[in-house]
Structures are given as C-alpha cells and as structure tokens.
Image (cartoon, rainbow, N blue to C red):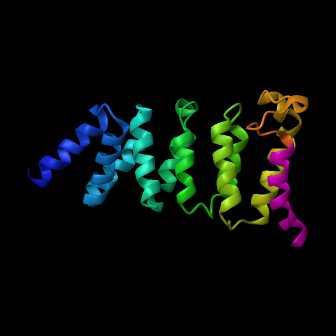
Amino acid sequence: MTREQEIKQLKSDLFTADEWDKRKASSSRLFEIGGQENIDYLIGLLDQENSLVRNVVAMTFMDNKFNDALEPLLISINKAEYVNSRGSLVYALNALDCSQKLRELFDILFAATKNWEVQSGILTVLEEQEFEFSVDDLQYIKQKWDGLKSNWNQLNGVDKNNLRKYEIDEDLVQNFVDGYMAYLEKS
C-alpha cells in the first residue's frame, strides 16, 4: 500500500470504523505521518458534526500535546451546536498549554450550565495549569461571576442542602474565582 493509499484508508476509517480504538488509531497514525495537509485535515475535523470524530481527533491532539490545536479546540468547545457533546474536547485541554486562556476558560465554565463534565474539566485545567493574565482579565472574570453567582446553584440544579459528590456548587466556583482574585489584592 502506498502512503497515499494508507492516508486515504485512515481518513475513511475515521468515519466508518465501528470501534473507538480503530478510529483513534487512524487519527493517531495520520498525526504520526504528519505533513501540513494531514495536520490541517485533523484540525478541520474539530468542526465535524460527528462528535465521535471530533472526540477522537481531540484525544490525538491531547496525547501528542499538540498546542497548535488549542485555538480550534476552543472554537469547537464554544459552538452552540456542540454544547451537549464537548466534554472530550474540554478534557483534551488538560494536556495543552492554556496559560494565556484564563478568561476564555472561565467563560466556558460560566456558560456550562448543567454540564458537570465540562465544568469539572475546566476546573481541572484551572487547578493544574499556571496562567498569565492581566488585571483586566481578573476584573472581567470577577464582574462576570458577580452577575452569575447568586443564580449558579439554581441554574445548575444544585440543592445546597442535598449536595451530591460530583456537583459543582456556587461555593466551589467561588473558591476558584477567589484564588485568582487574590492577585488583584497584590497589585
């Protein structure tokens, strides 16, 4: 099989393989073969309607710590039509350098109403990575949170008196916001 035939087969398998592992292997192999055309093709698949294809590609980028996929991932995460199928895309951010994206991460968190998977994924990135940010970024986050926090538990179906282990309540989000707002006091 020629390289061109292999690439054609891998692209086909991304859409037709019955098993996740075969789709993932196809995506990984395309990434491994490399070349701008293949990388651009994979990045383009982050905008694919099929969430399985998007997820497989996101995991390939995560496995390879391919930071050039950060912006396209963020665009896909924020697409209204993907709002119910973006958990894996958010998870992929864990391995990418999000140090310049504090404001964007909080925007995703604040907009992830009733989506524990996305909320948890963003909080993990916020907890595990280090960020560069401006006073304007922090004031933006604070203002946005201040406008949302009194309704957070209600919007997310959180009963403060009956808090389930996995739920992300107002207090938890407030702790994350406060952690960053401490930098305002230092400046």
Specify the segment rendered in magenta. 171-186
Residue 30 on image: x %, y %:
28, 52
Q: Is residue 161 magenta?
A: no
Which of 151 and 135 lies nearest the eye of the viewer?
Answer: 151
Residue 154 on image: x %, y %:
83, 28
Above or below, 85 against 38 in this view is above
Above or below, 35 against 28 in this view is below
Characterize the magenta stretch by its predominant secondary structure.
helix
Which of 42 and 169 lies nearest the eye of the viewer?
Answer: 169
What residue appears at the point 74 percent right and 66 percent down from the top-left corner? 134
Residue 18 on image: x %, y %:
31, 31
134 with respect to 94 (left or right): right
Residue 150 on image: x %, y %:
89, 36
What residue appears at the point 81 percent right and 30 percent down from the top-left corner? 158
Which of 135 and 62 lies nearest the eye of the viewer?
Answer: 62
What residue appears at the point 78 percent right and 52 percent down from the top-left corner? 141
The number of callouts visible is 0
